[in-house]
Amino acid sequence: MRLDKFICKSTRLDLAQARLVISHQQVLVNQKTITDAAMQVHENNQIELLGERLFARPSQYFMIHKPAGCICSNKDEAYPSVFSAVGLNQNEQLHIAGRLDVNTTGLVLATDDGRWSFSITRPEQHCPKVYQVTLAKPITSKAIKQLEKGIVLQGEAKATLPAVVKALSSTKVELSICEGKFHQVKRMFAATGNRVKALHRQQIADIVLDIAPRQWRALNQQEIDYFS
Ligand code: URA
């Protein structure tokens, strides 16, 4: 882990403040003053700030039920961030593992463990995600076949990986996909000539959303271990 990140993880300092104390020569690693914020350190290194040994806090892992109208970002922008929308006070270390669009609702995972989130989001992982999709027009059997087979999205050369499609009603579908391309679900249905009216994520791998909108909770050890 980078030295500046380690300092954030072990103190109440944010990244900018961590870099400042490093550049002000207030940080020792194994008894040597270090001014390189990017230096790679390990928990076994003896890291001190103004003479006090630092120990990294354990990583944090959360499930959030994202409401519509907020963004998967750390900062409020044109829309509030999902963290402020649900009242999850966080330091800037937390990030979202697999974003949702502003109007998409449902399961979002947040953590300060970059390796854990990468194991969810890296394309080779093919991490399954389950969405409930409300469509503008009834789904056709041709569209189901296209989605199950894989469909070429606008601007892409390769087809999507095969999806699992369960029609819940004529305009409601449960869709499971193992990719996370930009606006993927909306683009998949657009490619079948339909339009997504509402989108909700219910599940990521074995982690199932089980809290009400605008709630959040810490993940349990079993849920964390799915990606460890
Ligand atoms: N696919 C989309 O189109 N939007 C999302 O928010 C998630 C998946």
Image (cartoon, rainbow, N blue to C red):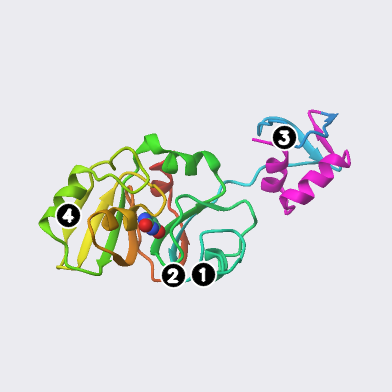
- Which is in the foreground here, disc 2 or disc 1? 2
Q: Which residue is mark 3?
A: 38
**13 relative position to 80: left or right:** right
The label on residue 225 is: none
Mark 1 or mark 4: whose residue is earlier in sequence? 1
N-terminal of the pair, mark 1 or mark 3, is 3
Residue extending farthest to the right is 24
Evaluate whether residue 63 shows in this view.
Answer: yes
Decide: marks 2, 1 in contact (CB < 8 A)? yes
The crowding category of the residue bearing disc 1, from other C-alpha atoms within 10 Å (few below 14, some 14 to 19, many at least 20), is: some
Which comes before the other along the chain, label 2 or label 1? 2
- The residue pinned by badge 4 equals 143
Instruction: Please tell me in which quadrant of the rendered image residue 168 appears.
Output: bottom left
Q: Position of residue 69 (x, y in %)?
A: 47, 71
Q: Earlier in the sequence, mark 3 or mark 4?
A: 3
In this view, the mark in front (3 or 4): 4
Instruction: Report the residue at 82% width, 32% height from top.
Output: 34
Q: Quadrant of ligand 1?
A: bottom left
Real-space Cα separation, disc 3 to disc 4, in angstroms: 49 Å
Q: Secondary structure at mark 2?
A: loop
**Relative to 182, is 156 above or below?**
above
Q: Is residue 156 left or right of residue 172?
A: right
Q: Residues within 10 Å of mark 4 (few under 14, many from 20)?
A: some
Q: Which segment is the magenta one?
A: 1-30
